[in-house]
Image: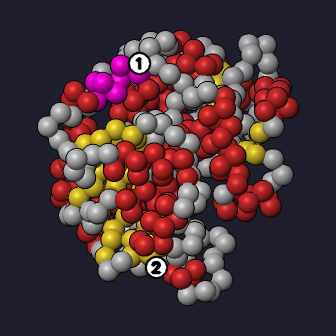
Amino acid sequence: MGTQPLPFEDVQNLAVRLGTDSEIIQGRCGTISAKEAGLMWVRAEAASLAIAGQSDIFIPLRIDQVLSGIQTNRDNPTELATLEADMGLEIDKIVQPLPISALDALFPHRIVAQVTPPNILALSTMDNGLETIRQRLDGLRFAIAPFAPPGAPLNKVIARTLGEQPEMPDILIVERWNVVVAGNTCPEIEARLKNVLDRLQIPSRSLPQPDIASLAQRLEHEQEWRLPKHHDIHTMGCDPISLEICKKGLLTGWQAITLGLKMPLMERSEKFWQASLRHEKGYQERPGYLVVPDEGVVVSVDLTPHTESLLEGFSRTLQYLPDSTSHQTLTADDTENFIKWRSDSLLGEVEAQVSPSLSTKV
């Protein structure tokens, strides 16, 4: 059964608009859901909102089963809420709903969108960022949920946060994760999202230019590496502040799930293959990209568009941090929990059949 045609053209069109705007969503990080007659239509895990107009990417779930899964602390409340599971049929092992979509069932609104604007994610990591968010969103129905790892912990934190509010919010800022906007119509969603984006604007830093000539020279005899398609990705290597942050760790949940246990930074005397091998031996993951200090970034020739888009989003998030100290990165334990969650998911199991070790090329 898997994905089915979405019966809501307005939601499908909104999905495409959100998914193709890199100021709102990076790669497959964003999602949107729509509810009707006890069902909630959510995005498939391996899909992207950007292709919602070209492919059927939505899966209908029973809302009562999703809520039951959250209440019983299931790590993935969506897996037993599909219509296949409801009818006792064999569950599709390849096309699965996005697990984080489960939290949409906690909102009574018809439509719920989860987006990942780089500036707001950056703000949520800053030392005084959450207080700034509270001040600027004053007067709106909003809430802020604290950071939690994916799966049951995150769903539990969000359920508790929503339950503590005097009235159900239309906007939820999930620290280091995303911005959740709920409404009953697509124009309502877009108006609320624009309001939040306008209120939470912060300046970005001016950045040095990458040393493309040096990188290109290094790549002349390389077959496994290339320059990234997104110019902003070079920020990670050529900008001193961004490079210092990369040395410390990742910033958000989505980045931790995809970009690896540790940022793969080259040492100055290394060749690409040496840096890649050192990283793989040290962290048991094959890097899909390498940060080259003072120059920029190179990526694997088979890096997926999703991961490259996430790298771009991470780089743009770095540009909004004023220095390398006034924010908090994820701890090593945080990142290990995220990677374990990913490897334990069905998508991770499918990938494991193809490759025996973790890769950051996905």
Residue 204 position, x and y percent, is: 35, 21
Name the kind of residue labelled 1 in the image: Asp
Picture disc at residue 127: 1
Q: Earlier in the sequence, mark 1 or mark 2?
A: 2
In which quadrant of the rendered view does residue 287 lie? top right
For the image, the number of numbered tags is 2
Q: CA distance from mark 1 to mark 2?
A: 44 Å
Between residue 136 and residue 32, name the one nearer to us.
Answer: 136
Query: Is 177 displayed left or right of 293 in the figure?
Result: left
On the image, which quarter does residue 207 sit in? top left
Q: Residue drawn 84% across and 52% down?
A: 356
Q: Is residue 109 magenta?
A: no
Q: In the image, which residues are magenta?
A: 126-133
Nearer-the-camera pick, 296 or 105: 105
Q: Residue at x 85, y 32 (%)?
A: 281
Q: Around disc 2, counting alpha carbons within 10 Å, would you say few (fewer than 14), some (14 to 19), or many (20 or more)?
A: few
Q: Is residue 207 left or right of residue 34?
A: right
Image coords of residue 9 (percent x, y): 28, 73
- Disc 1 is placed on an element classified as loop
- Residue 4 is marked as 2
Q: Nearer the viewer, residue 338 or 7?
A: 338
Residue 36 lies, with reference to residue 348, above or below; the image says below
From where the camera sits, is residue 356 visible? yes
Q: Main secondary structure of the magenta part?
A: helix
